[in-house]
Image (cartoon, helix red, strand yellow):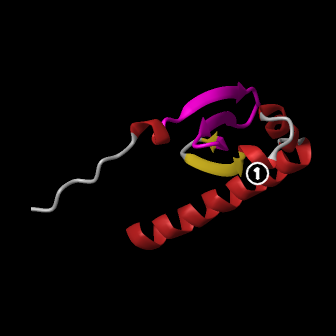
Amino acid sequence: MIPAKAVNVNLIKMRIIAELPHPEFKISILNMNHKFIVKIEQGNLEQSYKTGEADLLDGVNSVFELLDEAFLKTVATRFAEMRKDYKEAYYRYNY
């Protein structure tokens, strides 16, 4: 029998530190292991972006600055592409 590895649960705590209102997406900012994780959801699709805390000068406020109109426009385009790709794969498999 192989012994199970011990996991330090302090290293894997993820917590939501902010949620930003947006008409098209659910945007959550999480913190885990000295990283900010931006999770953007639309329906059953999700995009996530990770940035080290040390890479940002003003902490979570810097994350807010990254989420500007230009960036969110590309996120919307990517969601449309993701939805198209998924539908095409689904129909290839099911029909």
Label 1 SS: helix
Residue 79 place in picture, x, y as percent: 69, 53
Q: Residues within 10 Å of mark 1 (few under 14, many from 20)?
A: some
What type is the residue that disc 1 sits on? Val
On the rendered structure, is 91 left or right of 73? Answer: left
| Residue 16 belongs to magenta span | yes
Q: Main secondary structure of the magenta part?
A: strand
Which quadrant, please, contains the C terminus? bottom left
Q: Residue at horizontal 40%, vertical 38%? A: 9
Q: Nearer the viewer, residue 1 or 94?
A: 1
| Residue 46 belongs to magenta span | no
Which quadrant, please, contains the N terminus? bottom left
The residue that disc 1 covers is 75
Residue 6 visible to the viewer:
yes
Q: Residue at horizontal 47%, vertical 65%? A: 90
With respect to residue 50, does 82 lie above or below?
below
Q: In the image as oriented, which residue stretches furthest toward the bottom?
A: 92
Residue 71 place in picture, x, y as percent: 85, 49
On the rendered structure, is 14 left or right of 37? Answer: left
Q: Residue at horizontal 88%, vertical 42%? A: 68
Q: Nearer the viewer, residue 95 or 9?
A: 9
Badge count:
1
Q: Residue at horizontal 69%, vertical 35%? A: 27
With respect to residue 92, does 22 lie above or below?
above
- Segment colored magenta: 13-40
Residue 23 place in picture, x, y as percent: 76, 31
Residue 95 visible to the viewer:
no
On the rendered structure, is 85 left or right of 4? Answer: right
Residue 16 place in picture, x, y as percent: 60, 29
